[in-house]
Image (cartoon, helix red, strand yellow):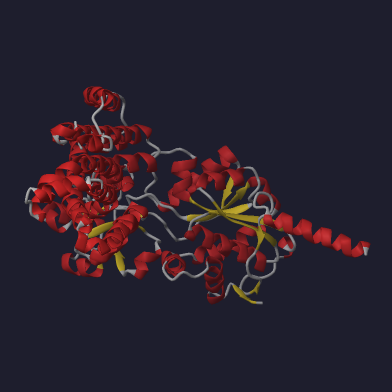
Amino acid sequence: MRRVLGAVVAAMCALTLSACGLGSGGTVPFMVAPGSIKPNAALEGLKITVGSKEYTEQVIMGYILEYTLAAAGAEVRDLTGIVGSRSTREAQLRGQVDVAYEFTGNAWINYLGHEKPIPDSREQYEAVRDEDLERNDMVWLPPGPMDDTYALAASRKVVERTGVRTLSQYADLVKTTPAAAKTCVDTEFRARQDGYPGMAAAYGFDPARAQTPVLQVGIIYQATAYGDQCDFGEVFTTDGRIAALDLVVLTDDKQFFAHYNPSVTMKRDFFDAHPQIAEVTAPVTAALTNDAIIEMNKQVDVEGRDPAVVARDWMLAEGFVTER
Amino acid sequence: MTTAVDSTAPKTTPAERLRLLIQPALVLIVGAAVIYWAFNRDLTATQQENINVGNVSTLIWQHLLITFAVTAIVLAVGVPLGVLVTRPGAKVLRPLFIGVANIGQAAPAIGLLVLLFLWTAKTGFWIGVLPIALYSLLPVLASTILGLDQVDRSLMDAGRGLGMARGALLFRVELPLAVPYILAGLRTSLVIAVGTATLSFLVNAGGLGILIDTGYKLQDNVTLILGSVLAVCLALLVDWFGGLAEFFLNPKGLR
């Protein structure tokens, strides 16, 4: 009898703990078995907390990191979906989150307080890596190719009609026939110096020349796809709607927009104790391309699939993990 | 007979008259103060994109135009509808139109804006105006119905006794007696319209919402406060016009 009571109490404690969002976090949503990611003796049974911000892309990337570490043998605790970059960063600085994907440009501008991004992606990463390590003891592993940043996009129709595929060509179009370059922006992009005004300065055209209707950021994708409401529209380069609405992203040929490349980040002491994390995560980070994340974002945001399932299916398809 | 009407109709009180004098002065002072405050400080390049004379005056103008168009639509639709559903033959329609107006006001304005965009695949002034008009229709419609319903039956009998036809009865007895109610409803509609017009920018109709949204997203309090205070000033100004209309347009016998 006493034993039964003890079990009930233990079960209730466990329930209360897992129900409490503050301390506990969850477990990895699906069990995965090693694939091209092999069990790593040094990580076997190691307790690692993986965090992410709350928006689709970050949650997907959080799960990808979790499956990666779980396949290597670590015991992963799930803290994906922390609301806001500030809170996520704070949780990581205080050691409540051990590892998380963070973006180079975001850290440079928002955490390290710089106004101007560094044009070259590699140099931007190196600058963030060095400064964040020095100031905050934060380690940045080599970044992946994915780049979630501002861009202009257009529908295939408009691209065929105008022949514009790069921002330099867009600038020429604004200079010669501004009426054909109606560009939809949101309030933020319209004012930010790393947005439309800065882009105009970098590409040498007058931002007041083309019409720039202000729309809500979500509406811009749809309105750009219609083609008659906006010839061009501001987008985020990894948004799933780019694929869903068949938009063409113009090449930033002068590399004006800040680079937001993902990198696995962790505190220095955690990295020093478990340097194997770098080799385990490296192939996964390298496989995270814009096309890959756009497709995954689309499956979640447009098709309504669960981010945990989408992330696992991608890992399976890439052969990183196998089903269990 | 007139005492019975007087006791129910909204009246212009001395306090209300005093408010009509003070309100515009207050609007001017507060509006001028916030503009002075926002323009006479060190603005970053980002802030200057919004806080410049051309942009701010364009946004105020757009906001006024939206409000004006909404007012015109609400009057042109709300009053005739109110008249229609109080006619003996058409009373069955009343729940229908009241229901539509209720839905219009109960649905989030932002949802109406996006729905209209998705439905028409268009953006621009009217896409920003029509949802706001639907959103602010209810007060005018409801007060028109109320105003016509409260007209003393004995006055209508008197009219009929004088040989008035239905049309004459409506225009010479019922509507004049309903004017105070309609104007009170219009005033409410107007203030709702000015407030919700801060969302019209979402579908490229412009307005002061641009300042508010930019300020909010970029954590730029100067732009945010400038936009919000100017919107408040416009609401007070529009309310003042409503008050003036009540003061001058209410039938003399009811003042």
Q: Residue at x 38, y 43 (%)?
A: B217
Q: Is residue B194 visible?
A: yes
User: Which of the two residues, B241 or A31, is positioned nearer the viewer here?
Assistant: B241
Residue A147, percent across and down? 42, 57
Q: Is residue B215 left or right of residue B1?
A: right
Image quadrant assignment for residue B236: top left
Q: Residue at x 46, y 43 (%)?
A: A108
- Please state, as top left, top right, bottom left or bottom right, where the C terminus of chain B lies in the image: top left
Report the label total: 0
User: Which of the two residues, A105 or A13, is positioned nearer the viewer here?
Assistant: A13
Q: Is residue A149 left or right of residue B35?
A: right
Q: Is residue A251 visible?
A: no
User: Which of the two residues, B139 or A126, is positioned nearer the viewer here?
Assistant: B139
Residue B89, percent across and down? 20, 63
Q: Residue at x 48, y 60 (%)?
A: A56
Q: Is residue B184 left or right of residue B72?
A: right
User: Which of the two residues, A135 or A177, is positioned nearer the viewer here?
Assistant: A177
Residue A103, percent across and down? 48, 52
- Please state, as top left, top right, bottom left or bottom right, where the N terminus of chain B lies in the image: top left
Image quadrant assignment for residue A151: bottom left
Image quadrant assignment for residue B248: top left
Residue at the farthest front position: B161
Residue B34, percent across and down? 29, 26
